[in-house]
Amino acid sequence: MNSEILLEINGLTHAYSGGLFRKTTVFEDFSLSLEGGKIYALLGRNGAGKTTLLNCVLGLLAYKPGEVRFRGKVMTPGNTHQFLQKITSVASPAEMFPGISADSYVNSHRKIYENWDTELENRIRSMSDFDWTKPIKSLSTGQRMQVLQALALCPEPELLLLDEPLGVTDPVVRKYFYKNLLSIVAERETTVIIATHLINEIANLFDEALFLKQGRLVMRKGLMEMQSTYRKFVFGKLPDVKIEGEAGRLIGDAAIISDHPEKTTMDLQARGMKFKPETPSIEDVFEAFA
Amino acid sequence: MFEIIKLHLTNKQHATTMLLLVFFAIILLLTTGQLVLGKSGTIHLQMFYLGKFLGFLGPLFVLSRGRNGEGKFFSRLPLSRFEVFFGKLIYLMIVYLIITLVLCAGIWTIAGVLKLISPSLQFTGMPTFHSLFQDAAAFIKTMPLFLLLAALSLWLQKWTSSNMANLLVVLGVLFVFGLLPVVTALSLQHYSITIPFNDITDFLNTYKTPLITAMELGLFFGAMGLYRLRHFRNY
Amino acid sequence: MIITIDEQNPVPIFRQIVRQVKMRVVSGELVGGSPVPSIRDLAVRLSINPNTVGKAFRELEKEGIIVMKRGVGAFITKNPPEEFMKGFGNTVIDGKIQDLVQTARSLNVPKKTVMKKIDIAYNGGKDEQ
């Protein structure tokens, strides 16, 4: 098992300016360290800082103070490009040159990167149903995403940063994207950070979920740990008072999430309330904490 | 670096061809007009001197991520900032060369064909190697200042929003231009505080060129507002 | 070897895999020496994290049901532990009986009826009496 630290973020602070004197802080003294060979789900509500965090790691956004280390080496503005041989990301389709064909994109990337997995490239091509010699502007957003996926997966990255990598693609494309992703993860122990709102889709994929809330890491757990720590109590009607062990409420489901199931059970029995305990889904945990 | 140039060239292939066709259409239209209406037998073949124009809009392209976020796309690649920068710069030069040379060749061809048909025709305004050289020099000379200004704005964006950074650079430029005459005037008139009216007129005459430059600057920053320089590997 | 997972089932996926492999070994579908799919193949086929499959395999190896050979893959052991071969069936049946009894009780189906139905099921659906 590969369990050395791959990525380390120390004391990262990022603020963006809205004007000369107005600054909005997204992260303040944020730290995180991730092990190699694992899949991490980066989860959080809109505006929690998922994209900002990934862009800081990629060097697309500046941070001060703070430090990002990859395999122990500090990334600086001057050397970021060397790390980017091993850290890839799926760009947004809007960033693509409209006049260039998918083929030219792939060919130029193949030359820019030191390694290139031609077998994977062919597999992605064979799964696609469009003409790669056509310019990007004649492809649909979903088809552009497929090109971008090839560009991010084929350079044999050690760290893959995926920010909503599937956008508006159809279920077949999604399915094979995950399968390709899993095959490279299993083969090369690639570390993946995947930020997405489609939590259920990745529930069986990640080793650990990182819950971000307003720029802070509020929870870091694997699915099994989550489901053994927390329990969902469903009611006919939500209790008006805070129940013992209650960690969060799912108002729509008339349920609570408890981090002390025994205490909660006892409290509920003492109050004479009817309830049904359940194993929470990842979406339940997300709603309660993120 | 080579890949960046190639990607840009392929991307803008279509646009460049269209631009050239438009220029040719204008040249042909003007020439035909002069042939039809002409009385003197002299045809004025206007060359498009693009050096200055590309010289001050080019830096925007070099430093910005552009409307489509190309800069951001390149920032994800394992290419150093210098490779991206010089790649774009060289692309810009190549485009300038292609457009200028193709237009010249076109004009020379048109003139040659007309001369064959009617040898008595005279031509003015023809591009010569000398005028081409001057235009190229203008291109090279205009670029650094605007590159510097765009870079300055980009650098300021580390601390403030892109619009505010642009504004600060504009104010800075205005300040320098505003201060220059005052400093000059003061140093000229060191011994007498009163500035006669004639002196002011003289003075404005001297600074005609800076005024034109200021207008150019205005145009540049107008365009800069449309583009966003952010996200070019934001350090 | 076909392994499937039930995403609705709250039982962790790695346990589902362990259990399915064990069932196939005890039923004789998988004999000693037969190959087990690679971690990568299984992860890709089931669309699950390779580390989850790895965890299941390590558990099976610890219990002496499979052996992992570096670079070659995993195989069913020639002689699975005796107590596992004998006990596993009972463990599974115990769980199922618990479920059955609980359901029968909550639906007020008498014990006699349940027993009779079990007899019928054993006789291929025919009532002996």
Image (cartoon, coloured by chain):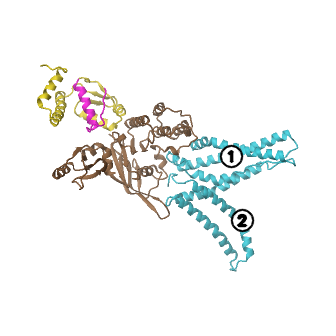
Chain colours: A brown, B cyan, C yellow
Residue A79 drawn at (x, y percent): 48, 50
Tell me the residue that label 2 is attached to. B208
Q: Secondary structure at mark 1?
A: helix
Residue A215 sits inside the magenta stretch = no
Disc 2 crowd, CA 10 A, few/some/many (<14, 14-19, 20+) = few
Which residue is at the front of the view, A280 or C128? C128
Which quarter of the rendered picture does the N terminus of chain A lie within? top left
| Residue located 69% across and 44% down the image | B20
**Residue A33, position as x, y percentages in the image:** 35, 50
Residue A98 at least partly seen: yes
Chain of residue at mark 2:
B
Give the residue number, with chain letter if any, for mark 1: B97
Q: Is residue B189 left or right of residue B66?
A: right
What segment carries the magenta color?
C1-27
| Residue drawn at 57 percent across, 39 percent down | A100
Q: Nearer the viewer, mark 1 or mark 2?
A: 2
Residue C53 in the figure: left or right of residue B145: left
Q: Amino acid at mark 1?
A: Leu
- Of labels 1 and 2, earlier in sequence is 1
Q: Are marks 1 and 2 on the same chain?
A: yes
The quadrant in which residue B117 appears is top right
Q: Chain of mark 1?
A: B
- Report the residue at 25% width, 26% height from top: C24
The amino acid pointed to by label 2 is Lys
Residue B98 in view (yes/no): no
Disc 1 to disc 2, C-alpha distance: 30 Å
